[in-house]
Image (tube, rainbow, N blue to C red):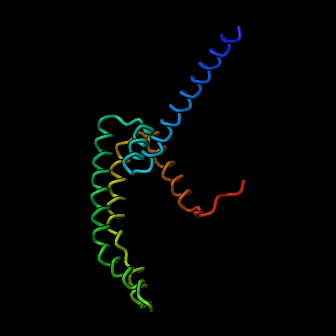
């Protein structure tokens, strides 16, 4: 009788291991997706349950936003390299550092992004718009929290 129970426990143990391995795989894949802008956008469209027209407007907004962000980063790169070079000096010139800090390379990007967002919101239903705005508000709130480099005490 004992060998039968051993086999039952072995199969049950194997089942639990497979269950946890599949769960880990799904969670890690989702976490990887959420690290990318595109992954977060894809999850967002699923959350809003967009129809074909809305999804087309959203995809266009994402493409334009991505292109504009890349352009803003390219525009910033020479000034950033100058900033890094100055930081590497024995006695960095404070004026050069502050000049870099006061430049706003993302201004045009933010302006265009605001207009794109308004266009997207115009095609949403009131419920979708409310969900979108709540998500944006939640993101803004989480972005204001200080980042800790130390693990939090439990």
Q: Is residue 9 left or right of residue 122?
A: right
Q: Is residue 10 above or below residue 71?
A: above
Residue name at image x 48 percent, y 49 percent: 133
Quadrant showing the N terminus: top right
Residue 90 lies in what quarter of the image? Answer: bottom left
Residue 50 lies in what quarter of the image? Answer: top left
Residue name at image x 53 percent, y 60 percent: 143
User: Which of 74/23 is in front?
Assistant: 23
Q: Position of residue 104 (x, y in %)?
A: 37, 74
User: Which of 19/1 is in front?
Assistant: 1
Residue name at image x 64 percent, y 58 percent: 151
Q: Position of residue 7 (x, y in %)?
A: 62, 15
**How many numbered marks does the figure carry?**
0
Residue name at image x 45 percent, y 92 percent: 91
Q: Position of residue 75 (x, y in %)?
A: 28, 71
User: Which of 80/114 is in front?
Assistant: 80
Q: Position of residue 62 (x, y in %)?
A: 32, 50
Q: Is residue 60 left or right of residue 16?
A: left
């Amino acid at each position: 009788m004992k060998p039968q129970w051993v086999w039952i426990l072995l199969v049950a143990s194997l089942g639990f291991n497979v269950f946890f391995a599949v769960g880990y795989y799904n969670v890690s894949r989702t976490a990887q997706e959420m690290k990318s802008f595109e992954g977060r956008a894809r999850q967002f469209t699923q959350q809003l349950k967009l129809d074909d027209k809305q999804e087309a407007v959203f995809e266009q907004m994402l493409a334009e936003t991505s292109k504009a962000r890349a352009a803003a980063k390219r525009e910033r790169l020479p000034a950033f390299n100058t900033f890094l070079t100055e930081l590497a000096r024995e006695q960095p010139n404070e004026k050069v550092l502050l000049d870099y800090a006061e430049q706003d390379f993302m201004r045009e990007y933010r302006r265009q992004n605001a207009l794109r967002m308004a266009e997207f919101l115009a095609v949403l239903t009131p419920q979708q718009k409310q969900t979108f705005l709540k998500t944006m508000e939640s993101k803004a709130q989480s972005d204001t929290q200080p980042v800790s480099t130390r693990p939090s005490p439990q």
